[in-house]
Amino acid sequence: MADQLTVIVLAAGGGTRMKSKTPKVLHRVAGRSMVGHVLHAVSATKPGCVCTVVGHQREVVGPHVTELLPDGVLAVQEEQLGTGHAVRVALDALTAADRMPEAGTVLIAYGDTPLLQGDTLRDFAAQHEAAQAAVSILSGIVAEPFGYGRVVRDDDGEVLAIVEEKDATVEQREITEINSGILAFDAAFLIDAIKRIGNANAKGEYYLTDSVQLAREAGLTVAAHPIDDVWQTEGANDRAQLASLGREMNRRIVDRWMRDGVTVMDPATTWIESDVQLSPDVTILPGTHLLGATVVGEDAVIGPDTTLQDCEIGEGARVVRTHAQLAVVDARANVGPFSYLRPGTHLGADGKIGAFVETKNARIGAGAKVPHLSYVGDAEIGEGTNIGAGTIFANYDGVEKHRTKVGRHARTGSNNTFVAPVEIGDGASTGGGTVVRRNVPPGALAVSSGLQRNIPGWAQSRRSGTPQADAAAAAASGAEPDDTAAD
Ligand code: UD1
Ligand code: CA
């Protein structure tokens, strides 16, 4: 491999068929922008320099590209006059940045081909260099070549030209070998050829593909290497293609994890984004979406019907029918079913967040449990503590948020309200229905509801004639219940 590999990524086009206010190359597939995927693949080739050509909505695309590749070069193509013009603009920008290659290989790629792999680019550049070609074409044999530039070969199979759809003869349109768009150039040849490309064609555009004919006329070598995996060079022009590329990418990601030892019960309903990290013997049940920078440890079981965005799940944890974002669940902890973990949730090892529990900014210690029907916001719960069913951590006074701290091995009753800021000490208890407004010292029992008062015979006197009163009267007389009236 030559020491000087320069990559030019073309991303100036409008993408009108997306019918979107978002530029085409910023549409996401598997959690990354399309151009993000391409730059990822490009970076894997360890290029000397990457130049991205932006134009349409460059005020959005430019910063996105710079964020992903801070030391790349950005070239601005004010008007999209064709791929040849785009590359000329790129070479000008490289010159201005004093990063113009004098020798070596220049690879051209497009910003909308998310399935492209680094290996493919690397192998293609190596083939190009081995053949000492002036231009190499990464071609593809496709069933429906309509719209693509066709690779025209002579009887000996030598590549003569690339002819665009609109300029092709009826015979040339029958050719099924197409230009994927990915080209490799000898740098010196490209610098010379780019100046000589004209726009006398059906579209009135500067075609980069005209360089093939220029090389042939100069007696230089041109090669075309068909790629087997044509998905890799496929671009998304509309939302339907975006979905189909997304589905294929997901299929590949899920497949890779299964080969790495992850059990996926239903690959068709499992969605795993590019940056997710899984461990061997993780089990993923149907309807699960693992998004962003989510990491899952060994033997954890996730799903069914669970979405985890940017979450960290420890070894052997179980997360069932849960929606979670920016949450950490430590080893062997249990979450769900029907739990909602919001940012800043940290559940300690062996802990539990149970059914219909919502948490936010909550540190729940090792072995601590919030099993049922609760809201835990801005809270710290010590190890081994049990929070009673239906407890609300009232963290918001209508103006500001406050924290609640519950100590270690506390036992709080059902249907409590903890009015923050408040502290419940280590080993403390609270009775059912307690509204905790003042701190509870360690070991104390807090009760806040008044003493219970019973008014005897109330049903008989105030609800007379109702089944309630009849039942009460029967109980008072010791008679057997008579339920026939209800039938
Ligand atoms: C191009 C190729 C064609 C190939 C096809 C593969 C040429 C002349 N034709 O055709 O042989 O089969 O791609 O998809 O090269 N772009 C710019 N600036 C421009 C024009 C285009 O940055 O001025 C970018 C676009 O954003 C896009 C890529 O270059 O990412 C291809 O441009 P497009 O207009 O889609 O080319 P095609 O007509 O599809
Ligand atoms: Ca195209």
Image: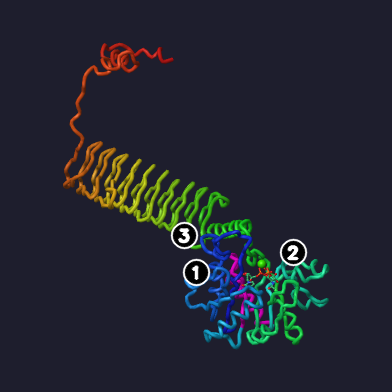
Q: Give amino acid for label 3.
A: Gly
Quickly name the residue at label 2.
146
Q: Nearer the viewer, residue 163 or 6?
A: 163
Q: Position of residue 249 (x, y in %)?
A: 58, 60
Q: Which contiguous range is marked in magenta?
A: 105-131
Label 1 and label 2: CA atoms lie apart by: 32 Å
- Quadrant containing the C terminus is top left
| Residue 469, image quadrant | top left
Mark 2 residue type: Phe
CA–CA distance in space, label 3 to label 2: 36 Å
Q: Is residue 263 left or right of residue 453?
A: right
| Quadrant of the image containing the N terminus | bottom right
- What residue is pinned by disc 1? 64
Helix, strand or loop at mark 1: helix
Label whose residue precedes the other's in the sequence (3 or 2): 2
Q: Which mark is residue 350?
A: none
Q: Which badge, 1 or 2, comes first in the chain's sequence?
A: 1
Mark 1 closeness class: few <14, some 14–19, many ≥20 residues within 10 Å: some
Query: Is disc 2 placed on a helix, strand or loop?
Result: loop
Which residue in the structure is indicated by mark 3? 292
Where in the figure is residue 300, as x and y percent of width and height? 43, 53
Residue lying at 74% horizontally and 62% vertically, measured from the top left: 144
